[in-house]
Structures are given as C-alpha cells and as structure tokens.
Image (spheres, rainbow, N blue to C red):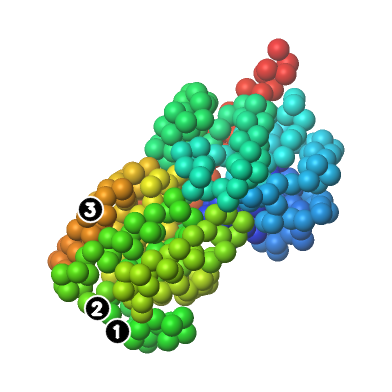
Amino acid sequence: MKIGIDATCWWNQRGFGRMTRELLSAMFSLDSEHTFYLFVDQAPDESMKLPNTEIVQVFPERPATDAAVANDSRSIGDMLQLYKAVSNSPIDLMFFPAVYSWFPVPLKLPTVVTLHDAIAELFPEKIFPDLKGRLFWTLKVKLALWQCQRVMTVSHAAKAEIEQYIGVKGDLIDVISEAPNKLFRQVDDSTMSQDLRRRIGLPEEGKLIVYVGGLSPHKNLQGFLEGFALAREGQQIDDVHVVLVGDYGGAGFHSNYDELQKLANDKCLKGLVHFTGFISDDDLVILYNDAMAAAMPSFSEGFGLPAVEAMACGTPILSSDRGSLPEVVGDAGVFFDPYDVKSISRAILRMSTDHELRDQLSKVAVPRAEGFTWERAAKLALGYLETAAQKGARSSNG
C-alpha cells in the first residue's frame, strides 16, 4: 500500500510535533511492504530519507511550523500547492498525524485525521488568543472531519471527549497511545545534575517539581502555583522549587507567561519558581532524574506525553485527575482536583514530605512507562490505516 502522510508538523516543537516524529519514525522502521509518501514544506530531515519513503516537497509561503498554530492558518495558495502535490501522487490513502496542519485532499482519496483531544472545544478562551484563531480552528476541524473517513486519537479519554464535544461517532474513532522515547531512562549522576542546575539557573540544593509543556491557561499553572503557595504557608516545604520548562511566547498558542510571573511575585514565591524556556531532550532526561516529581496540573489532556517521559526516568507524577491523566499515570502519581487549590496544596505537601511514598511511586513509574511503546502505537496505526484504505476502496468501487 502507498500511504501519503502530511509530515509538515515534523519540525514543530510542541507535543503534536514530537508525536509526529516518533510515530512516523516507528512506522518507517516496521517490517512492512508499504511505501510512505511524505509531503513536506521545507527541506526534509535526513532521518526521513529511507528505502520505503518518497519525499514530496512543496515550497509554500511559510512552513506549517509557522502556519499551523492557534492564531493563524495556511494561505489558500499554500493549500492549493499541497492539494496538487497529493493529487499527482499515486497514493492509496492520506494520513494526517495532526489536524493542526490539515489541508484539503481529493475527495475520493480515503483519509484519516488525528485529533489529539477536544481541549479547544472545551476551553476555547484558554487556547486561542483571539476570535480569529477560534474561527479558523473551528472551520479547519469541521472541514477535516467532513473529508475524512476515520479519526485517530491518543487515549480512550480523548476518544470520549471527541465523541461528546465534537460529535464524532465513537465507532469512527481509533485509539493508539503515545510513548516515551528510549532516551528517557533512569540516570544516576549527581555531577551531571549539578552542572545542569548551574547552566539553567536552578539552585544547587533543594527538591524540584518539574513541569514540561506549554504555558497556556488550560495547563492550569496558575492554579498549581496558588496551590504551591498555600502548601508553603505551613513552612514544611521551604526546600521545594517549581521549574517550568517551555516556550515563553507560546509558539503561536495562547501563553500566560506574564501572568504567571506576576503571580509568582505576588505570592512571595520569587526565587522558588524558575522559567527555563526550551531545553534539549538530553538535559530534560537529567532534569527528570533530578526531580522529586513532575507536575501535570492541566484541566484536561489528550494524552500527557511529559508524564510518561518522566515516569520512564523513575519520576513520580503530581497529576490532575481529569482527561487522560488517570488513564496514563495510573499508580505512579498523586492526584488532585485541578479546580481546587486546597486539593493541589495537599497533593504537593504529601509528595514533598513523604519520602517512602516517593520511593514507592518511583518503583511503579518505570514499568508503567514501559507499557507504552511507539512500536505498538505504530503497529496499531498501520492496522487502522490499512482498514481505512480497504473500506475506502470498496466504497469507490461500489
């Protein structure tokens, strides 16, 4: 089978970009007879050039990394270029690993689109900087769903929310999962940890709670910092710091970096809350291993990839009890109600003061993370794509 893939999100630094790279790389490495036609809008990555791939490059006004964001969209000219590239390719099916970079394809071509979650429909005011972005997103999703035969998503919780809030029938939604890269592992090296702390401006001593991801309002970092401030009132956790790893500007998505900085100062947390910006995956592995816990305080998540990356390093999770997080984290975390600051505070206190609990959660975290693999996700995805192509062919012949 000749599978067309929108690979224009390959270079994106957010979660859907990482998922695109990991899933596609795993699909390419599987022993299959498929040929993958990769539609790209910039110079292809060397890792894309394989015996079972064909690169189809277009030259748009700007790449999807810039255009496929919450407050903007592709130009009509760019979409026309991509449409023509797909039309002129001998593919049996088109796969979009992320709806963010969707573009129209010929109507007779079976199509599968990935919706990672329904967060934009649940919390539009927390995702989009303005009404324009909200309208573009709604139109793009509606058109993508109108054109596709099936939807892929990354957790059973996401499937339920897509069915409830976007209106896609459950029997049309296939579920895979995300997984940690093998780079994320347990590392015991205090010298590397101390060096990293110096390089990114963290204190030499003290316990770290690490958050990795966007600084969008739906991530509930404001509520988490309020819970952290409340937990500190009893003076039981003077040695705990919160580290926020992620892009300050939001990379085209809504960011409340300025509000978070103000909150940290207003709550007398200055010097205890650290904004690092992006850091490399190699440094992230060291940081997770050095951390007391990783925080996932979101109002909802489609999957929560940073959670399994941290778990693979043996790091316990301080987690919201909403969306996919209970499904992903399982017994490797302490849960809280993201809408209740006191609940957040109690969870932070419990994790910070109970060493035996942290050890227990750490032992559970690694095998839990090992249950998520990109190879398994790729096998499932290929099976779903094969089924969609077969159904599409029967429909065309009928």
**Which secondary structure, mark 2?**
loop
Q: Measure the alpha-carbon separation of dots 3 and 2.
A: 21 Å
Q: Are marks 1 and 2 in contact (CB under 8 Å)?
A: yes
Say whether disc 3 or disc 2 marks the residue closer to the N-terminus: 2
- Relative side of 80 to 197, left or right: right
Residue 132, above or below 249: above
Q: Amino acid at mark 2?
A: Asp
- Relative side of 380 to 243, left or right: right
- Relative side of 368 to 24, left or right: left
**Which secondary structure, mark 3?**
helix
**Which secondary structure, mark 1?**
loop
Q: Quadrant of the N terminus?
A: top right
Residue 68 badge: none
Residue 343 badge: 3
Residue 220, above or below 112: below
| Nearer the observer, 244 or 255 | 255
